Image: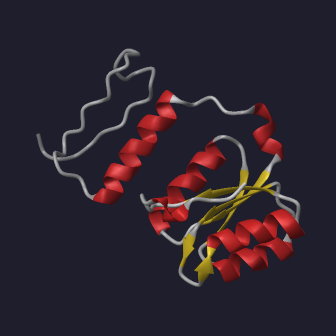
Amino acid sequence: MNGTMQAQPRSEARPETDQEPAVSNTEPSSRKKLVIQTERTLAKYSTCDSQSEFMTVLLVEDHTDTRSVLGMLLNRCGYQTVTAKSLKEARTRLQEMPFDIVISDLNLPDGDGLDLVREAKQTHKLKTIAVTGRTSDENATED
């Protein structure tokens, strides 16, 4: 094998099974792993809520690859997605247009994403989702 990948439309690819497709590159970069994992997830769970096309999401995430993948997933489900990579940028976006949902990383380079979540709930009366890449209990959120 030469270390390359080739995608085929589902109709031409392998028959429907629960098996994951084989990847010829044995040690892909972390970005490539993320894209492969995302594509597998999208193929497996491609149903989305029909009301999503009417909802606008503010996605706040400082990590470029994570922001890109989450944005791709949300867009694929029909959400209108606007992204921000910092607390300051998110606050600006909230003033520029209305949103239905805010999804925010808790650990932003210029502040605490939990502050943004609280602010979005109180000031803008928005539904919020807080996310983090940390694995400890120190990031537990409140109701």
Left or right, 29 with respect to 43, comes to: left
The foreground one among 11 and 77 is 77
Residue 56 falls in which quadrant of the image?
bottom right
Residue at x-position 44% and y-position 29%: 9
Splitting the image into 4 quarters, where does residue 29 fall?
bottom left
20 over 140 or under it: above or below: above
Residue appearing at x 45%, y 62% in the figure = 65
**x and y percent of residue 82 in the render?**
70, 63
Q: Position of residue 141 (x, y in %)?
A: 63, 59
**How many numbered callouts?**
0
Q: Residue 58: horizontal and vertical position, in percent?
A: 72, 62
- Name the residue rendered at 48%, 59% in the picture: 137
Check the image and tell me how it is coloured: secondary structure
| Rendered position, 47 above or below 133 | above
* Left or right placement of residue 23 versus residue 85 in this view: left
Towards the viewer: 11 or 85: 85
Locate the N terminus by quadrant: top left
Q: Indicate left or right for 86 with 49 as reference.
A: left
Residue for point 32% across, 50% down:
33
Q: Quadrant of the C terminus?
A: bottom right
- The x and y percentages for residue 49 are 73, 33
- From the viewer's side, name the closer residue of 10 and 115: 115
